[in-house]
Amino acid sequence: QVQLVESGGGLVQAGDSLRLSCAASGRAFRDYSMGWFRQAPGKEREFVAAISWNGGTTFYVDSVKGRFTISRDNAKNTVYLQMNSLKPEDTAVYYCAAGVPFSGLTGVIGSVRFWGQGTQVTVSS
């Protein structure tokens, strides 16, 4: 079992940056690929980014490529999402996920095992 707690969300202006953090419990953290998803009001939850267990492989949805960076620190049981050049359309609840089966070429290829509670990111224009 992995429990995930997100932090770092908030209200920012377009063009600003935010860094989300996700702290995971359990010594198995380093065994899991990790990811971030988001859900905007009235929309389905969508994939944002994923990272392999050792950080060697990442994958991003096209809309955030070049602006967002996912990283992890296995010693701290934490995964991060650095978000730069934020846009109003990035407004959503952002969810951390553990056990994200993905391919570095095609993206998510299976079901997520564990979810966090989410953190709100609001970008004003």
Image (cartoon, helix red, strand yellow):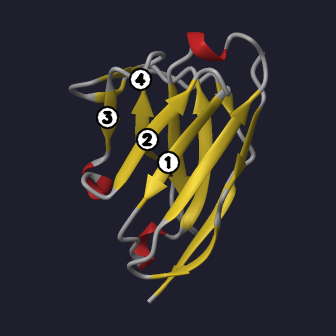
Under circle 2, the secondary element is: strand
Q: Position of residue 51 (x, y in %)?
A: 42, 28
Q: Residue at x 35, y 70 (%)?
A: 85
Q: Residue at x 78, y 28 (%)?
A: 3
Q: Is residue 81 visible?
A: yes
Disc 1/disc 3 C-alpha distance (Å): 12 Å
Q: Position of residue 45 (x, y in %)?
A: 53, 50
Q: Is residue 59 above or below residue 40?
A: above
Whichever of callouts 2 and 4 sits on the residue coming sooner in the sequence is 4
Q: What amino acid type should be assigned to the residue bearing mark 3?
A: Phe
Give the residue at mark 4: 55
Whichever of callouts 2 and 3 sits on the residue coming sooner in the sequence is 3
| Mark 1 in CB contact with mark 3 (< 8 angstroms) | no
Give the residue at mark 2: 70
The quarter of the displayed image where residue 76 is located = top right
Pointer 3: residues within 10 angstroms few (<14), some, or many (20+)?
A: many
Say which quadrant the N terminus sits in. top right
Give the residue at mark 1: 81
Pointer 4: residues within 10 angstroms few (<14), some, or many (20+)?
A: some
| Mark 2 in CB contact with mark 4 (< 8 angstroms) | no
Say which quadrant the C terminus sits in. bottom left
Under circle 4, the secondary element is: loop
Under circle 3, the secondary element is: strand
Disc 3/disc 4 C-alpha distance (Å): 11 Å
